[in-house]
Image (cartoon, coloured by chain):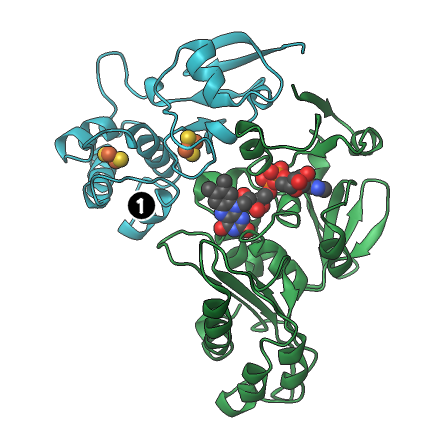
Amino acid sequence: MIKVDTYRAVAEAEASMDGQSRYMGGGTLVMRDLNYGSYGFERLVRCTDPRLNSVRRDRGRIVIGAGLTMAECAENRDLAFLAAPAMGVGGPAVRNMATVGGNLFAPPPFGDFATAMLALDARVRTAGGEELGIEALLASRRTFRRIVTEIEFLPPPRGGFRFRKVSRVKPKGVSVLSICALLPQSGGRIRGARIAFNGMGATPLRATGSEAALEGRPLDRNGIAPALDAALQGLSPADDELATSWYRRTVAPVYLRRMLLERSHAY
Amino acid sequence: MAKTPIAFSLNGMERSMFVDPGQNLLDALRRGVGDLSPKYGCAQGTCGTCSVLVDGKLQLACITLAEAVAGSSVTTTAGLADGSELHPLQRSFMDNFAAQCGYCTPGMLMAAKALLDRNPSPQRQDVVEAISGNLCRCTGYEPIIDAILKAAAFMRTRGRP
Ligand SMILES: Cc1cc2nc3c(=O)[nH]c(=O)nc-3n(C[C@H](O)[C@H](O)[C@H](O)COP(=O)(O)OP(=O)(O)OC[C@H]3O[C@@H](n4cnc5c(N)ncnc54)[C@H](O)[C@@H]3O)c2cc1C
Ligand code: FES
Ligand code: FES
């Protein structure tokens, strides 16, 4: 049977973690595993430190606590650009529970919010003070046994952040794929775009081909054409019960085009 | 493995109980306290029939760790009626044929309650969003949406919480 340990201080919680422990954020995924008896750990670690739910500014960067729920994120005016990815996670009850920290570890088809963090080039901080970039975290998350306490990023330029979730069940279904883009512009040309896909690999991944092809181009039909051709470079979607790999490869450039051209998806 | 003692308020009454490590709130409510109003559907957060309010917020009891509600206030469908007087949402569900097999009904009612507590004048789209985490296999959702909108209108004129 499982053991549950609850700590007030997150540093203590992390220090107690070993190979048999699993940290629980909102528990929306961990509890499912427990209910179905399919968990590979003996001990559940919780933390009630209220700082895990904080939102603050630090030298121009936004720092959000890993325990912030999707609902809290969607309601926070300083995080208005994240309302779309936060509202994209589950229904209202799931959003009241699901944390932004847990989303970084959620396996496909989940990870819509993590995709936004990847587009924003976020950095995470652990209870032990370690800092790492979002890509390093996503690449190592299967074996990651520390507790993420904070996620920080620069706010996107106005109008330069877009998110789109593609699901089959309306109004709410899990993602066939989701896309998020940071699109800074200078003189009407894209400079340093970051485009991230969820559902196109084992973790959220950058569409580096599209990013390079957008550099210096205007955000119009002709300007984005090379980026659409390059959209699938380095991405390898799986076949699963939601869609085939072929389907995802076919629709990903279509949804990327819509997202890049439709201003209604811009924050 | 040692059980954990917890105390919380359930529909306004103080409750104390022992929960197993890892036990979910749905199981604790149904088997521990005997409140059978939140239903057991999928046990994976997908169907919404176990929805309850924890400190006023909609949560899925099946994926809520029971010991995490210690010190909280939990509301289930059993706490909606005022004695023998049904809550306007319950009455509206009856009057508008919003329940067929009834399995989704407790979850729908709690999702609707969470909405109306926050927004007494919802638009249709607000209702659709509010029940988007709750599955109904019988009604096609339209009677449920109508029932919630009608209950909201009734509550605005009568002022019942
Ligand atoms: C019905 C339903 C619908 C859903 N729909 C979506 C959806 O549309 N999009 C989507 O992206 N997700 C969805 N999810 C999945 C899930 O709710 C979210 O991904 C959520 O953000 C996970 O966060 P959590 O806090 O609940 O994670 P938990 O269940 O607490 O944990 C998940 C994993 O993350 C680890 N973890 C959690 N927090 C931390 C931390 N601070 N540091 C280190 N490790 C941590 C845990 O150890 C565990 O391995 C859905 C889930 C359900 C039940
Ligand atoms: S039983 Fe809880 S969501 Fe289905
Ligand atoms: S009335 Fe049967 S599932 Fe909704």
Q: Can residue A69 be seen in this view?
A: no
Q: What shade has chain B been given?
A: cyan
Q: Quadrant of the N terminus of chain B?
A: top right
The answer to which of A2 and B53 lies nearer the viewer is: A2
**Where is mark 1, residue-wise?**
B127
Q: What shade has chain A been given?
A: green
Report x, y in % for residue A51. 72, 37
Q: Residue at the spot x=74%, y=60% of the render?
A: A135
Residue B29 lies in quadrant: top left
Q: Quadrant of the C terminus of chain B?
A: top left
Report x, y in % for residue A88. 48, 54
Residue B143 lies in quadrant: top left
Ligand 3 image position (quadrant): top left
Could you tell me which chain the residue with mark 1 belongs to?
A: B
The answer to which of B122 and A238 lies nearer the viewer is: A238
Report x, y in % for residue B111. 36, 35
